[in-house]
Image: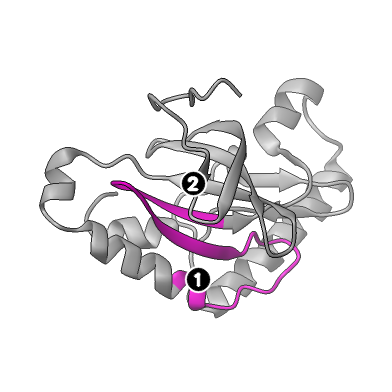
Amino acid sequence: MNGKGPSSKHRPDCFGPFPVRADLGASRFGPVYLGREPSRNARAVIRTFELSREWREFGEQSDLLDSFRKLCETTLDHPGLARPLAFGAEGDIPYIVYSDLPGTAMDAVMRQDGPRPFEEVLQRARQLADAIDCAASAGIYHGMVAPCDVILGEERAGVTGFGFAQALIKVGIA
């Protein structure tokens, strides 16, 4: 909470109306923060995109934000999916906000606890497949699921980060 993000020079106090509470780490595109959704007083995840100067000067930021807007207008209503809530730009840093899924990222669970029992893995795989199928039926795809995107809760597995890879690909970033 010293104002320094994992890969940024300075962490803003908020992104739009979403106050930043803590650093969660960094993706290959920029820092990820834990924030607060003010309307529900609920946890939210803020993914930022630190784009190259050349890319910003090319004017593609508005296209990226338009893709994020369309993603936020899509209904992803499934307990295993982090829902896109809002988007914007803080200065020249585009961001998208997702609902927070309760639990711990799979990569952290694996490092701490090691392999899980087969029955648990099978149950979690079915839950993930159901969530991924729900998103696909809405025309939203993940594009690069990694263990840090799979959230293992006490009762349910979920996936975060749906749709932003499609937006990045559409504007030629990823």
| Mark 2 residue crowding within 10 angstroms, few (<14) / some (14–19) / many (20+) | many
Image height of 72 relative to 57, above or below: below
Q: CA distance from mark 1 to mark 2?
A: 14 Å
Residue 13 in the magenta stretch? The answer is no
If the image is split into quadrants, where does the N terminus sit? top right
Which amino acid, mark 1? Answer: Cys
Residue 167: image tag: none
Classify residue 61 by image quadrant: bottom left
Residue 125 place in picture, x, y as percent: 73, 54
Q: Closer to the N terminus: mark 1 or mark 2? A: 2
Residue 94 in the magenta stretch? The answer is yes
| Mark 1 residue crowding within 10 angstroms, few (<14) / some (14–19) / many (20+) | some
Compare residues 59 and 37 and report the one nearer the observer. Answer: 37
**Which residue is pictured at 52% across the width and 77% down the height?**
74
Report whether 157 appears left or right of 93: right
Which element carries disc 1, helix, strand or loop?
Answer: helix
The segment highlighted magenta reads 71-97
Report whether 71 appears left or right of 103: left
Location of mark 2 (residue): 47
Residue 72: image tag: 1
